[in-house]
Image (spheres, helix red, strand yellow):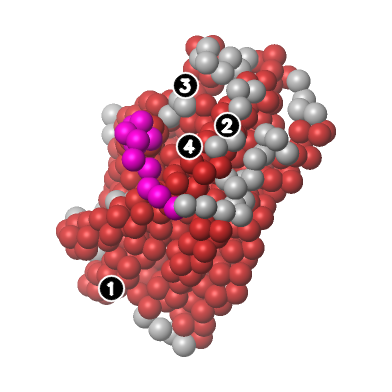
Amino acid sequence: MKITFVKEKSFYRSVLAIMLPVAIQQAINMGVNMLDTMMLGSFGEVQLSASSLSNQYYNLFTILCMGIIGGSSVLAAQYWGAGDKEKVRETFNMAIRLSTGLSLVFALLTWFFPAQIMAIYTSEADVIEQGVRYLRITAFIFLIHGTSLVSAQLMRSVGQANLGLVVSIISFVVNIGGNYIFIFGKFGAPRMEIAGAALGTLLARSAEFLTTFFYILAIDKRLGLRVRHLLKSPSGLFYKNYFRLGAPVLVSDGLLALGDSAVAIVLGHMGAAAVAGNAICMVVQRLFSVVISGVSNASSIITGMTIGRGEREKAMEQGVTFYMLSMIFGAINAVLVAIFGPMTIAMYSLEAETITVTRQLMTAYIVIVFFQAVQSVMTKGVLRGGGDTKFLMKADILFLWLASIPLGAVVGLVLHGPAWLTMLCLRVDFVIKSVWCVSRLLSGKWIREVSRE
């Protein structure tokens, strides 16, 4: 099969149509997170660390939701490309049901065992105490956020990427206002500090939920999903087909979520300075990786639609093009982190030790963001959109859990290495997957026509 790059302008217009709304949405979300950390940073490293570790636990839930989305998007994009609207609606129905079940499990665990959850991430009693205050309110967020997140993300698979952007703008306004009022006790409200940050998030997620489902169930006509479609259970055969292709995505994203938690656990046992420093670095890294998130989403959706239409050679050409785009944007991200990372650190009120650790970690993130970009577009984008989910599951198991996590744990907790070196070890799977996925891409074995199977 001849390997070439895409030259048609319509392809790049399609990429931009998905990428830009997703990138802006991610930038808004990261901006909220940055303001959260700055507001809580004014109360010291303890509350900043507690919030960061609590959100690592919440990220576990979010990534599992993204696993549901990832598996569902493979089906939705290819069914949409094949013109089977009824199957797309059935995919939405199933995904919402799965996210509801997952949300209820997390809500119950968070409400009844907040201290035990925090103790997994840190042994510092004051950090655990503050984290419990945050998690008690977080327990009410899971159901409304899980269902709205899954629904808004899946709308991208049917060419409606702007919904997520609109929802994020509304969430941004509500979150910032709620945080300012309840963290600092403005306009007669009680000063709640870290609990106020959680309450602001609850209000924002509630606004997201109402906006998302009002649009999908009452306004949208392109997909035409209505309440009656959600009341009808998907067939057993449909679930079987989903779990054949989607279960590996759930496992992969579940392992990645646990991997992120393992990173937080390792750093959490290295002290509050390492946790606070990494919290700042992660905000910067995510802020400058929003374009990659957009490219990754676009590559998955466009690849799925192309394969759904039966255009295998075109899918291969697009895959190679997306790989080159990932390296270009990865290099740009690395430069941005190098330039703006030190400037961001100066915006926080930190102790001298924390400043030193944060600067060292930021240097490590310059390397990390490049390889993160490449592997993200390949694993979460092209290969996943092509239905190659079992291959990706094996890659996550091998490289994350047999290389990155053990190596990072040994360097950080056994050898007591510096935080920056520990972080590089914990992300070495990014490097391995960036290289390994190339051979899979060029082999063409990743192209699987779900709709025909």
Q: Are marks 1 and 2 in contact (CB under 8 Å)?
A: no
Please tell me whether mark 3 or mark 2 is closer to you in this view: 2
Q: In this view, does 237 lie to the left or right of 376?
A: right
Graded by Cα atoms within 10 Å as few (under 14), some (14 to 19) or many (20 or more), the crowding at tag 4 reads many
Q: Distance between the residues labelled 2 and 4?
A: 11 Å
Q: Distance between the residues labelled 1 and 2?
A: 48 Å
Residue 228 visible here:
yes
Q: In this view, does 343 lie above or below 419?
A: above
Q: What residue type is labelled 1?
A: Gln
Residue depicted at x 30% and y 55%:
328
Going from the N terminus, do you reach mark 1 or mark 4 first?
4
Q: Which amino acid does label 4 sit on?
A: Ile
Residue 40: give x, y in percent of width and height. 32, 51
Label ID, residue 155: none
Residue depicted at x 62% and y 66%:
397
Label ID, residue 211: 3
Residue depicted at x 64% and y 45%:
448
Please tell me whether mark 1 or mark 4 is closer to you in this view: 4
Label ID, residue 360: 1
Q: Which amino acid does label 2 sit on?
A: Arg
Circle 3: element type: helix
Residue 268: give x, y in percent of width and height. 46, 69
Task: Write down the region rendered in magenta.
Answer: 3-13
Going from the N terminus, do you reach mark 3 or mark 2 first?
3
Label ID, residue 302: 4
- The residue singled out by tag 2 in the image is 309
Residue 379 visible here:
no
Q: How many labels does the image show?
A: 4
Going from the N terminus, do you reach mark 3 or mark 1 first?
3
